[in-house]
């Protein structure tokens, strides 16, 4: 499995500086046809869990930003 995080400076909707993060995961499952079947079964759950994790990270980062502004 390979995890890639990319960060890019961008301008937010209000013209403020922001950072865009892109996450990409690449993996290979062995076990031939059985592995392909397992992959198809587990992919929706992995995607849902990643979306939840990214939403939680977004909430955390935004709350930290609000806390540091005083």
Image: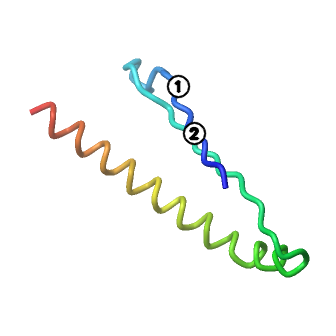
Q: Residue at position x 44%, y 25% from top?
A: 12
Classify residue 45 by image quadrant: bottom right
Q: Residue at position x 51%, y 30% from top?
A: 7
Query: For this rendering, which residue is in front, 17 or 24?
Result: 24
Do callouts 1 and 2 mark residues in contact (Cβ within 8 Å)?
yes
Q: Residue at position x 64%, y 46% from top?
A: 24
Q: Residue furthest left?
A: 70
Q: Position of residue 14 (x, y in %)?
A: 39, 23
Q: Position of residue 63 (x, y in %)?
A: 24, 46
Going from N to C along the chain, the mark reached first, 1 or 2, is 1
Residues packed near mark 2 inside 10 Å, few (<14), some (14 to 19) or many (20 plus):
few
Q: Position of residue 21 (x, y in %)?
A: 51, 36
Residue denoted by label 1: 8
Residue denoted by label 2: 22
| 51 on left or right of 12 | right
Above or below: residue 44 compared with residue 16: below
| 61 on left or right of 49 | left
**In which quadrant is the C terminus drawn?**
top left
Q: Residue at position x 15%, y 34% from top?
A: 68
Above or below: residue 44 compared with residue 59: below
Give the Cα distance between marks 1 and 2.
Answer: 8 Å
């Amino acid at each position: 499995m390979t995890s890639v995080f990319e960060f890019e400076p961008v301008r937010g909707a209000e013209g403020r500086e922001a950072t865009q993060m892109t996450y990409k995961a690449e993996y290979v499952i062995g076990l031939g046809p059985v592995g392909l079947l397992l992959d198809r079964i587990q992919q929706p759950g992995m995607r849902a869990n990643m979306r939840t994790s990214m939403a939680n990270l977004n909430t955390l980062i935004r709350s930290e930003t609000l806390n540091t502004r005083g």
